Image (cartoon, coloured by chain):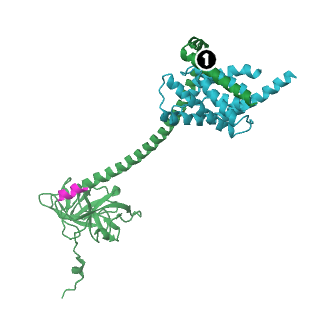
Chain colours: A green, B cyan
């Protein structure tokens, strides 16, 4: 049994070597070429199918890559959009702060300001009050004047550690001594009205006030510093009792749309009540 | 006899598939060889003489479509068949362990035989590169490819052997 196996093996190896030797010597070139001839079309056919299958699988892989890339780009776009929205908010804040810093610079005073966001307002409709997010921790104290680059806003009437309540000058309980910027520097009192307008009252009947003249604080009552812009006269008329002139003052401040204000923290209003309550000896 | 009638066309077809379709499944320099896997499957399923016939025919089919000299692959496959027959003999078609090992071993024997012949024929072969980029990936791919191929070839051999026996009776 062993011998036939060896014989078969040696025969097979010998045959292979013989073919190899003949091929090496070049005797089988023509036979090889002849055998190749009919195989080439089949090879082309299968090769074409193989190429198409490879191209198809490559396209599938590319589709997967493109989908993945698309997802990445969509995610990146979402991130960029969020970033743009955030940057726009920053720009808006920046522009407002630049305005405020310019205002402080133009004022040329030595007041120390604390900027604060308007975080709420009185919704009762009775009081014209706003809430800001700066309090005693920020140096804000009771009575501090509140302004914007466009003019006077009001004064702090309540303060906590982290916030404060500001009474607007448009409130009917508010009164500010004011002067009109004209050659005679006529003065009066600007007070709020129930409909939210500012009224310049108690102006001397001989005063030369007229429309478009600007109105500033005088600082006489020590409730506000002097020379803060309140607004400009929109109309002038005689009071009902005929003793004074009155004028409607239009502020440049949009009291309904206030977002950012400045609190003057180093102004110390004088408590004049102490003089009123002291008994005369 | 039916088996031999089908053998040559099948080996020709497998060598065509090797040179066209399977050449797209390259891993480094290597690709699976359906012809080698069919010869190994055949060798594990039939007696030695028939296995050598397929090895020589399969090798010629490979060489006709490759750069190797005619007879080189036949010699490599004959060496592989001789060693496999000594180690494994015939293997049952449900065996899942021996065929991949046989395919891996046959790949080594085939390529080790072929490499010097290619060198002799003027084709440069870097031994280290051939080991990592040619031999090992080829072993792996052929070991995987033989799992379905062996089932089909062994099943076909069993079927046609029964038919031949019935015809003789």
From the top left corner, tell me how far across and down residue A120 is, in percent.
38, 62
In the rendered structure, the answer to whether residue B25 lies left or right of residue B12 reads left
Give whichever of B52, A184 is nearer the camera: B52
Instruction: Judge whether B2 appears above or below A114 on screen.
Output: above
Instruction: Judge whether B38 appears above or below A179 on screen.
Output: above
Q: Residue furthest right?
A: B169
Residue drawn at x 29%, y 52% as measured from the top left? A94
From the top left corner, tell me how far across and down residue A82 is, in percent.
41, 48
Would you call the spot at circle 1 few (<14 residues within 10 Å), some (14-19), or many (20 or more)?
some
Residue A239 counted in the magenta span: no
Tell me which segment is drawn in magenta. A100-107
| Residue A203 in view here | no
Instruction: Judge whether A233 appears above or below A60 on screen.
Output: below
Residue drawn at x 64%, y 24% as measured from the top left? A13
Q: Image quadrant of residue A7?
A: top right
| Residue A189 in view here | yes
Residue A102 counted in the magenta span: yes
Instruction: Judge whether B65 appears above or below B113 on screen.
Output: above
Residue position marked by numbered label 1 in the rendering? A42
Chain that bears disc 1: A
From the top left corner, tell me how far across and down residue A117 is, in percent.
33, 60
Residue drawn at x 50%, y 36% as measured from the top left? A65
**Secondary element at image label 1:** helix
Main SS, magenta region, reads helix
Give whichever of A192, A39 is nearer the camera: A39
Quadrant of image for the C terminus of chain A: bottom left
């Amino acid at each position: 049994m062993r011998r036939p196996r060896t014989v078969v093996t040696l025969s097979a190896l010998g045959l292979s070597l013989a073919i190899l030797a003949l091929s090496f010597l070049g005797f089988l070139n023509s036979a090889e070429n002849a055998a190749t001839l009919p195989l080439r079309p089949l090879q082309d056919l299968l090769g074409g199918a193989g190429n198409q299958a490879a191209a198809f699988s490559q396209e599938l892989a590319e589709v997967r890559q493109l989908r993945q890339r698309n997802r990445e780009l969509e995610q990146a776009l979402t991130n960029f959009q969020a970033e743009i929205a955030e940057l726009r908010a920053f720009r808006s804040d920046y522009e407002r702060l630049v305005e405020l810093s310019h205002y402080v610079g133009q004022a040329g005073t030595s007041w120390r300001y604390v900027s604060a966001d308007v975080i709420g307002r009185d919704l009762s409709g009775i009081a014209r009050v706003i809430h800001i997010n700066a309090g005693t921790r920020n140096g804000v104290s009771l009575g501090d004047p509140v302004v914007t680059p466009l003019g006077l806003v009001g004064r702090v009437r309540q303060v906590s550690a982290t916030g404060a309540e500001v009474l607007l000058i448009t409130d009917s309980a508010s009164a500010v001594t004011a002067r009109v910027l004209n050659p005679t520097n006529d003065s009066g009192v600007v007070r709020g009205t129930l409909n939210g307008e500012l009224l310049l009252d108690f102006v001397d009947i001989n005063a030369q006030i007229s429309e478009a003249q600007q109105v500033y604080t005088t600082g006489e009552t020590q409730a506000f510093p002097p020379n803060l812009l309140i607004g400009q006269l929109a109309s002038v008329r005689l009071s009902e009792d005929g003793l004074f002139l009155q004028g409607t003052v239009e502020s440049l401040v949009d009291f309904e749309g206030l977002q950012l204000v400045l609190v003057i923290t180093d102004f110390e209003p004088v408590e004049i009540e102490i003089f009123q309550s002291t008994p005369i000896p | 006899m039916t088996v031999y009638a089908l053998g040559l066309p099948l080996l020709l077809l497998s060598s065509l598939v090797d040179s066209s379709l399977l050449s797209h499944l390259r891993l480094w320099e290597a690709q699976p060889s359906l012809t080698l896997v069919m010869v190994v499957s055949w060798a594990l399923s039939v007696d030695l003489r028939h296995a050598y016939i397929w090895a020589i025919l399969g090798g010629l089919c490979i060489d006709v479509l490759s750069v190797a000299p005619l007879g080189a692959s036949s010699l490599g496959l004959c060496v592989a068949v001789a060693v496999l027959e000594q180690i494994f003999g015939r293997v049952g078609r449900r065996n899942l362990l021996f065929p991949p090992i046989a395919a891996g071993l046959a790949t080594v024997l085939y390529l080790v035989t072929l490499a010097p012949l290619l060198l002799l024929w003027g084709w440069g072969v870097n031994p280290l590169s051939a080991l990592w980029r040619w031999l090992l990936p080829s072993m792996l791919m052929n070991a995987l490819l033989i799992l379905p191929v062996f089932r089909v070839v062994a099943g076909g051999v069993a079927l046609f052997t029964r038919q031949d026996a019935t015809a003789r009776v």
